[in-house]
Every structure is written in C-alpha cells, then in structure tokens.
Amino acid sequence: DFGTLLHEILHGYGEWVRTKHANDWCAAEPDSAAKIDELMHEVIPRIRSSVLMSRASYRHRIERIRRTAQQVIRHLTSWAKASSFHPLGFEISFGRGMDDVRLEEFQLAGGAALSLRGQIDRFDVTKTRDYYLVLDYKTGAAYINLVEVYYGLRLQLLTYLLVARNLLAHTEEKELLPAAMLYCFLKNPLVTAPHRIDEAEAKKLLQGQLKMPGWVLADADVIRALDSTFSFTKVALTKKGEIDKRKLDYVKTEEEFAILLDYIAYILKDTGRQILSGEVRALPYRLKDRTACRFCPYIAVCGFDPLVPGFSYRRLQSHEDAELMDSMELKGKEEVG
C-alpha cells in the first residue's frame, strides 16, 4: 500500500533524526537521500515482501514512493527551518495495554465504559514546551470544517488533540495549550503553469499545493512560531501583525479549542451510548450534495437504497459557525447517560 509505505518511511526517518541528529532536521538534510534509500530497503520487504521487485511496473511504483518520500522530507525540513516546534514523537499509539498513552475510559450508563484505540502520526511541541500540535499524514485530499465536526463526521484530528492533551497532563509539570491540528500531505504533486517558469516559481507553486490545512490557534505569536514564513500552513498575518481576515476559517481561539475538545468527549460518549442502546439502522447522512454512501465499500452489505420504501437519508443542515459553537458549548457540558 502506497500510503502505508510512506508512513513507515517517515516514521523511521523521524526517529533517525531524533536519535542521531538531536531532532535537528536541518542537520540531517545532507544525509537524507541515503537514509531514505536505507529505509526503503528495510520497509518494502517487510510490508510487501519481494513482490514489488518482481515486475517493471512495481519497480516504477517503488521509484514513485522514493521520489514522494524525498519531496515530503524536503518539505518538512524546510518547515523545520521556519518553525519553533519540533517533533516529540511519531506514530504514538494509544488505547492498548502496552501503548505509549493510557487513556481514561469514558464511563457510560449501566457500568459500561468506552475506550479508544488509535495512533497519532506526529506530535510536536515548542522548545519552551508551552504549546503542542498534532499532525496527521494524508496521501489524498483533506480538509476540516465546523459543520462536519458538529455532526460527528470528522473527529480524527480533534480526538488526537484530546489524546495529546491527556498524554501531556501525565508527563509535563505545566499545562500546554493546543497550537494547531493539521493535515500533512504525503504527495509529490505535478506543477503546471500557462507559461515557462523558473525553479523558484516552481518551488513556490509546489509549496502552495502542500500547505497544511487544519486549525491553528488565533494568536499572532503562535502563528509566527509555527511558520515564520507563512508558507507551510493556510494561515497568514498582515503587515500590521494581525491575522489575515481571509484566513479566519483556519484559526480557532483558545476558548474555541477548549469547547471543541469538550464537545469531542461528548460525541464519543454519545456514540457509545447509541451502541449500547442497539442503534444499528442503516441511516447514512446527506449534507448538501454529499452522502456517506458515495465511497462506502459496504453498500452491498447494508442494503441501503433510498428508492426502496422505508429507507431515507439522515439529512443534515448547515449552520453559521457561531451558532454551531454555541450548541457545541452547551452539549459539551452535558452528562451522557
């Protein structure tokens, strides 16, 4: 699997930088190409045995993986030069007996409890250990919006942020604040232009396609610490040092992050309640022109068909962000029974 191989290579590379170069990605840069080749020789046989070397088409796929890994690591190294954050860990597993993070279970009615299992791709902190962020690697498209969080359709990044907060509460002497939750693209995109461009322009276009979407803390100092060049995230500051109003969809205040984390805990517990209540109806959502069935591989199993009497979509309504935040704040304070 293309994504799995890239994840493994990035994890191995990050651990190598942490142990051999004191977490200095810039110092590791001269040896990065050789290290990527070394990791590929280790990872590919372990994941795909020798099948990837058996045909020319597979060998071409390996070269694609190599070029993509090189591009991603160049991009992350450039970001390291512009950022005050550094990785605290890679592929941090949680929820199982021997994992890095032991989470408190969510208590449900009747003495039942809900536990979570997963893995955070990358977890960063500032050098002063005041702020933290989580990164999730994506080989495809990625985005986040408040409507889908509200309806429980996009919980991954916020759940990781919640897990990271729990981890830090057990390991740090002071409370760290969330600075960002971001998607990092594992891609080597094709750059096109209507006219001939030089290398500098090509790099700028490439960087634009690799900008990390997500939510960043609405604090000018944190935004500068995260990305002093404003080239790696979707957020930017004006010449006056204020957050660019065109980028407000990508920022959240400290209070909003707190509301969101409480709301995620509520959604998780409410999901557990629904499971215990025996709620198993095939009731996929429809939000505007999108449905849960569009890419679902299990449509033949569930048998859902809106043309058949008795089947219908769960129609979700869009709302203003302020209205959603107010509703999430109230729900986050509720006790789920």
Image (cartoon, grey):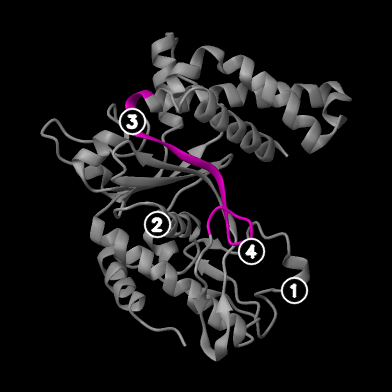
Q: Residue at the right extreme?
A: 54
Residue 266's tag is none
Residue hosting label 4: 293
Residue 286 placement (x, y as % from top left): 53, 68
User: Looking at the image, is mark 4 or mark 2 earlier in the sequence?
Assistant: 2
Kindly identify the residue that appears in the image at 66 percent across and 81 percent down. Answer: 280
Q: In the figure, is residue 245 to the left or right of 275?
A: left
Secondary structure at numbered mark 3: loop
Crowdedness near tag 1: few (<14), some (14–19) or many (≥20) residues, C-alpha within 10 Å: few
Residue hosting label 1: 303
Crowdedness near tag 4: few (<14), some (14–19) or many (≥20) residues, C-alpha within 10 Å: some
Residue hosting label 2: 165
Compared to 227, does 143 lie above or below? below
Q: In the figure, is residue 42 to the left or right of 254?
A: right
User: Looking at the image, is mark 3 or mark 4 earlier in the sequence?
Assistant: 3
Residue hosting label 3: 83
Kindly identify the residue that appears in the image at 43 percent across and 24 percent down. Answer: 24
Crowdedness near tag 2: few (<14), some (14–19) or many (≥20) residues, C-alpha within 10 Å: some
Residue 95 is inside the magenta segment: yes
> Where, quadrant-wise, is the N terminus in this rendering?
top right
Residue 201 is inside the magenta segment: no
